[in-house]
Amino acid sequence: MQSSAKYLTRKGWYQTAIIAIIGGTYILGSWVLNFDNLSGLMAVPRAFGWLGINFQPTAKSVEYLPKIWQKLMQTVLLAISSTVVAAIISIFVALIGSKVTGINGFVQLIVRGIASFFRNIPLVAWSMILLFSFKQSDFTGFLALLLMSIGFLIRAFMEIIEDEASETMLALKATGASYFQVIFQAVLPQILPSVLSWILYMIENNVRDATLVGILTGTGIGFIFDLYYKSFRFDAAGMTVLSIIIVVIGLELISNQIRKVIL
Amino acid sequence: MIDSEDRVIKKPQLPSSPNIKLHETSLSRVMILLVFVSLLLITGFTLTHLDTANVQLNAAVKELTSTLHQMFLQPSTGSDGLGELLQGLGMSLLISIMTTIIGAVFGFFFAVLASKNLTNVYLGTIIRVVMAVVRAIPTIIWALIFSIVCGLGSTAAILGLSFHSVAYLTKAYSESIEGIDKSTIESLEVTGSKFWVIVFQAIWPTIMASFVSWTFIRLEINFANAIAVGAAAGAGGIGYQLFVASGMSFDFHEVGFIVYLIILVTFLLEFIAVKIRHFYLDR
Amino acid sequence: MLEVKNLDKSYQKDHPALTNISFSVKPGTFVAIIGPSGAGKTTILRSLNQLIKDDNGEILLDGSNIRSANKAQLRKYRRQIGMVFQNYNLVERLTVIENVLHGRLGYKSTLAGVFGRYTQAEKEEAMSLLKKVGLEDFALQRCSELSGGQKQRVGIARSLIQHPKVILCDEPIASLDPASAQTVMQLLKDLTEEYNLICVANLHQINMAKKYADQIIGIRKGQLVFDEAADLLSEDILRTLYDQDITKELE
């Protein structure tokens, strides 16, 4: 009895300590960054008030719509194509790099390293480097999204293969099937739905990230938002944000429906 | 004959039927095929119609190679100096930690209210819809909006990042909560416990592991976002230094150094996340 | 005839998983390997089709040594050795008949296998095997929709279509309810007799082993301590196999 009482006391202390550390970090952070929590909190309703007044679409802002939608569709297409190309590359790399289907330990290590490297170089850095060599064009945006997506998808696909395909892989190996037969008959059919689900997720994500890339590289929806915003045409900027919301939520709904059917 | 071995297992006695189907056309198969084909078509169309601004591919690749060479093989601290870069890095890291804390606290609160197995449907639906809208707006736009109200700086960055953080974590946590076995909640309900008692005595301990793991995933995302916001909204931190070095002074040696610093921190975050996740999963 | 001679295996140095295992099995025999967890039952089974490479010894199938086979030869041996798994290891998203036909992959050219082209004769055989295991009505269902016992019967059909001389069963009934377990064991026993197979199964349930097996092999700490006809398994031997081990650990 006593030891269990002791355990509970210790657990209590332990939780208090964790909360204290987290709270302390937060207060320290506020102090270092000069972040006034109260006025920060106050800024939220003020921001929404400001949004309500300035972002209100007017009769004039409807004129911007065709231009906004053209850029937005361009961005969505860019997000889709960069994801698809990244997925095609990643699935091959993941197959040779996963613990289950991989070639050997050395290759696996290299693949993991490369994926991690691509994933962790910030999107800002990719955009700026590519902008310098490939100039202000959609192609630059495409490449930045592509490189980023490859890093994420390689890791995701490798995890899917290791989680979902290792047992069936073993069974087919035991029947005397060759490597490619096992890949095409067991591994790929098994992982296909999860892979597709990840691709859909990556497309949604890339549409949002494309906004950032667009601001930096002067392409797509990010560019047009930045343009309106910095020239104080807030009604048009509001229209842009509204369009982004509609498209992103639309994509999310479509993806969820697809997932429901395939999983 | 399908068998060439000496020992043959009995041949089938079944009357040979004309075609044996291997699978029926199910909705799932059709859907997968349909989605893949349309994605490929869209990609094909986009890539052939891509605006490349008439860039000479050869020259561009050559230039890129030399840029990458400068970055990764000859990194240097550049005009900012090590001290200032580390300060910027610390600032970005602090912003990401603080916004993750804000996101976790509010996210958990909203997640409890939004979970289908805990609260009434209307409240849950309202929260879910609001969060979906908040999530749909890119972080960078949130930061830009707040930078007008609060002025450029870390306050705008923190508020902007927090919004997305809260919305993301609300969704993640509420999915974990909805995955809880109903009996866990019922066992405390029958003792007559109050709602928040059930939340902290039954739900919190059950989702602890996935809570920690989602929070750390968000921390990594927030760090990346803090850099992005610093660069694109001028909100300070290492992101801004990265933007200046790569887009204004074109000092790619410094860009390389900054990228190395960032990669170091993300590796560290990933390492800590793995350790802590193991710690919670093993218990 | 399956012969195992002086099989050795260690995963770490100085920690042998198997030491000097030798036994032989005649066609038409159902063999059960019993012993405590971690004794090396799975290691033996997976050495038999070389999913685990052993360190020393010989494994002879009708006189030819599997251990010294090169990659292409090994694939030929493997297709004569069916395997049934505890977790069934089916491709859950494919249909029952597609999973059964996977057993033919070892006989096909790589390209035909990659694209899943099967001959009419193969499909007919798959159907007749499904009938044999009582699943002919389920041929076009997805495996994910089946119960555990049904999945295991698909696994058995998959191994039979390989036209095997040997079927290895790695804990075939460990995840099944008692009724399905009986069905699966009876099916394995009947098939062993009907096709004159060698069936080697790892089992945790001693009563199942005694009821269905012809021959029982007892493994303890990687060593063979018993290899006799099933009815010779006595209380004394079971105590050496399990009890002493447990009391020893308690000390």
Image: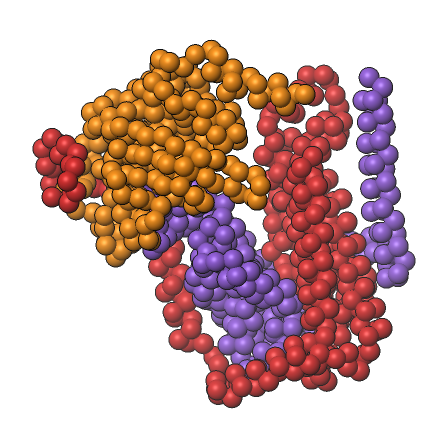
Nearer to me, A85 or B257: B257
- Specify the chain shown as red: B
Give the colour in which the image draws chain C.
orange
Q: Where, quadrant-wise, is the N terminus of chain C in this rendering?
A: top left
Q: Residue furthest top?
A: C235
Residue A136 appears left or right of C218: right
Q: Residue at x 26, y 28 (%)?
A: C26
Whether residue B181 is visible to the viewer of this picture, yes or no, is yes
Q: Residue at x 76, y 44 (%)?
A: B105
Quarter holding the C terminus of chain C?
top right
Q: Which corner quadrant of the image does residue B259 belong to?
A: bottom right
Q: Residue C99: horizontal and vertical position, in percent?
A: 30, 40
Of residues A34 and C98, the one nearer the viewer is: C98
Q: Quadrant of residue A136?
A: bottom right
Viewer-proximal residue, A233 or B108? B108
Q: Is residue A202 above or below residue A2?
A: below
Q: Residue furthest left?
A: B15
Chain A drawing hue? purple
Residue A69 in sight from this viewpoint: no
Query: Residue B111 location, x and y as percent?
Result: 67, 40
Vertical comparison of A55 with C59: above or below? below
Residue under the point 57% across and 82% down: B64
User: In the image, what residue occupies the spot 51% across and 15% down?
Assistant: C239
Left or right of residue A58: residue C35: left
Image coordinates for residue B19, horizontal then vertical, percent? 14, 42
Indicate whether B20 appears above or below C242: below
